[in-house]
Structures are given as structure tokens and as C-alpha cells.
Image: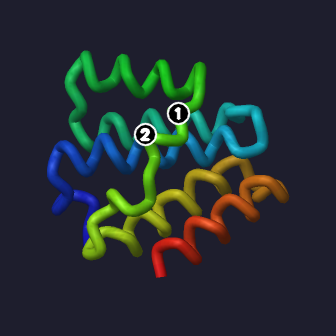
Amino acid sequence: MPLRTLSQKDRLRLIRFVCSFVWADLEVHARERAFVHKLVKRFHLDAEEAAHVEEWLKVPPRPEEVDPQRIPPEHRKLFLDTIKQAIAADGRIDEEERESFEVLEQLLR
């Protein structure tokens, strides 16, 4: 399912998840930040939404804001694929990122 099929609400939800995952190793690397910024542009987020994303890049979203059960079933593969791309954007997947991703994968199956 292509990213363009997501509603605006689900686009923001996806970026929120991506931001939480790039924080898994407690550091947002420049390439991960660039990946998130590309998503913001690709999704045509407005200024207020983009400001939220910038906050998530400074401080990760709270756990209750990234509840995997809120990911619509039809979008789960897209979320997993995009998150995996984000955590690999810096050229490596750290142990913390890998473990967090595996947990999400199990929760969504």
C-alpha cells in the first residue's frame, strides 16, 4: 500500500512512530532526521504538524502516543517498512533499534 493512500491522521501517526523508533538508541542521527524531514515534505504536512514533528525529533513521543494497536491493520506492513527504512537511514541498525522493531513486528502480527 503506497504512502499516498494514508489519511492525514495516519500520516502523522506514522511519522510519530518513526520518530519514536529513531530515538530507540537515545540519539537521532543526522540521516535519520533527514529521513523524517523527507516524510514531512512528502506528506505535505502543514506548519503546525511539522512543528509537532520537530518536537518529536527533540524529545521522543510518549509511549501512550505510539500504541501499536492504533495502527490500522491495512497499514501495518507500510508502517513496518517505513520504520525499518528510518532506523536504517544512518547506515546501521543499533541493537536497541533492532529489538524495538522486533517487538513491534511481533505485536502487529
Residue 88, percent from left and from top? 67, 57
Numbered disc total: 2
Image location of residue 32, percent across then percent down = 61, 41
Q: What is the three-letter code of the residue carrying label 2? A: Glu
Rendered location of residue 74, percent (x, y):
26, 75
Q: Nearer the viewer, residue 101 or 54?
A: 101
Secondary structure beneath dot 1 equals loop
| Depicted 101 relative to depicted 44: above or below | below
Residue that appears at 34% across and 61% down: 71
Q: Position of residue 2 (x, y in %)?
A: 26, 68
**Label 2: element kind:** helix
Query: In the picture shown, does residue 66 fall above or below 72?
Result: above
| Residue 85 located left or right of residue 43 | right
Residue that mark 2 sits on = 65
Direction front: furthest residue: 64
Q: Is residue 65 above or below residue 84?
A: above
* Residue nearest the viewer, comparing 67 with 27: 67
Q: Is residue 76 above or below residue 15?
A: below
The quadrant in which residue 15 appears is top left
> Residues at badges 1 and 2 in contact (C-beta under 8 Å)?
yes
Distance from Cα at disc 1 to Cα at disc 2: 5 Å
Q: Amino acid at mark 1?
A: Arg
Return the residue at label 1. Answer: 62
Q: Residue at x 52, y 33 (%)?
A: 62
Say which residue appears at 57% left-offset and 52% top-offset: 86
Towards the viewer: 39 or 79: 79
**Which residue is farthest bottom?**
109
Point 73% across, 55% down: residue: 97
